[in-house]
Image: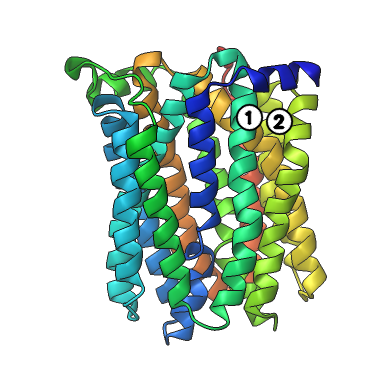
Amino acid sequence: MSTFYQSLKLLPRPFWVLIGATFVNRFGVFVWPFLTLFMTRNGNTAAQAGWAVSAYSAGSFAAAWLGGWMADRLGRNVTMAVSALGSAVCMMAMSQATGWQVLSLLAFITGVVAECGNPAGNALLQDLVPIEHRVTAYAVQRFAVNLGWSLGPICAGLLAEHSFFWLFAVDAATSAFFGVIAWVCLPRGNKTAAHLAGWAVAWDSIKRNHAFLALFVACICGSWSFRQTATTFMLHLERSGHSPSAAGYILAINGIMIVALEMLLAASTRRLAARTMLAIGYIMMGGCFLVLLGASPLWSFVLAIVIFTIGEMFAFSRQQAYAASLAPDEMRGRYSGFLSFAWAIGGIASSAGGLQLYDFNPAAVWILSAVLGVVGALALFVVRAKAET
């Protein structure tokens, strides 16, 4: 524990600026957990809502390619600023749409714009923090993200009962704040020479990095489970007779648990193998939905989110640091972007396929999620990693 807190003191000032701005931005992620409800209340079906959510994931797929290149070639802060400010504009445009076709198009554009800043954020953290302190740094980052997530859904749930417009407005405002801070207060970070900044060079490295490819497969499986919490989980909660405010409180449990427990978990498990923690986490994230089989009283949703959160803490406390240990220094943005492809692929499949499968048979979604959790865990051990972080 003492080593963990000593490590905290060594984290640089720009890192803390990034963390503060991230907290504000994540507090304001109001729209996506409630997008399915917003669309179905405007006369769209669950399947149509699924197309809009999957369109966002398709946009994030393109963003992984664009954002990875921008982060390495143009600079981390510029990429994050353009992404966040553009996201604010997109949110306000979405607030005025109702039909699923228009919302799907806007969701795709929003996915491209909003998600292209993620590789830059991850790469900047790796630039700022030495490898021996990255587990600590990512634990702090997740603390900030989930502190915002623990408070934000409560406010969003209460606002949703009065007007969905304010979800979009607050989301846009916090994105704009993050964009200004990134532009003015954060460093550019490492910049790669033009002849080394292309995707062809990065792919030549990635295709030989078997441990990283195994993580890529595991993340696709993990993304399916993660995306269910904002799609089928929310829809099933409403169709089981529970209110949007109850949904907000249940989602807040996730953030509260992470804020209260993940720093302690990171400190107490620093010496455990990364892949073992990732594997246990993916199994729990997928398996948690099995408690929704059959009747679904409110307590079953609470239990599902508690199990999911424990798994998330096991997996995500190590995932980014483990991925960073596998990436060459000059390719951090593109490696992070390539890993985002995995989350986009899983997100597209889970958003469109998950909601359509839910309309056919909700139990099939919960069972498939559990199976994919096991598949993701097994994928990590197919090859030997060159490093454990």
The percent coordinates of residue 289 (x first, y second) are 70, 59
Left or right: 313, with 42 as reference point? right
Instruction: Name the residue nearer the viewer: 352 or 117.
Output: 117
Q: Which mark is residue 196?
A: none
Q: Amino acid at mark 1?
A: Arg
Question: Which residue corresponds to the image point at 38% horizontal and 67% vertical from the top-left?
Answer: 52
Q: Of the residues shown, which amino acid type is indicated by label 2?
A: Met
Please say which color scheme the image uses: rainbow
Q: Which mark is residue 277?
A: 2
Q: Quadrant of the C terminus?
A: top right
Q: Residue at x 26, y 33 (%)?
A: 70
Q: Looking at the image, is 213 positioned above or below residue 368?
A: above
User: What residue appears at the point 47 percent right and 20 percent down from the top-left corner?
Assistant: 128
Q: Is residue 172 left or right of residue 211?
A: left
Q: Residues within 10 Å of mark 2 (few under 14, many from 20)?
A: many
Secondary structure of the residue carrying numbered label 1: helix
* Disc on the earlier residue, 2 or 1: 2
Q: CA distance from mark 2 to mark 1?
A: 7 Å
- The residue to which callout 1 is attached is 318
Vertical order, 165 against 316 (above or below)? below
The answer to which quarter of the image holds residue 364 is bottom right
- Answer yes or no: do the residues labelled 2 and 1 have beta carbons within 8 Å? yes
Lateral position of residue 348 relative to residue 20, left or right: left
Q: Looking at the picture, tell me which residue is in the foreground, 106 or 207.
A: 106
Q: Is residue 256 visible?
A: yes
Query: Which element carries disc 2, helix, strand or loop?
Result: helix
**Residue beneath the point at 57% across and 16% down:** 385
Q: Position of residue 53 (x, y in %)?
A: 42, 64
Nearer to us: label 2 or label 1:
1
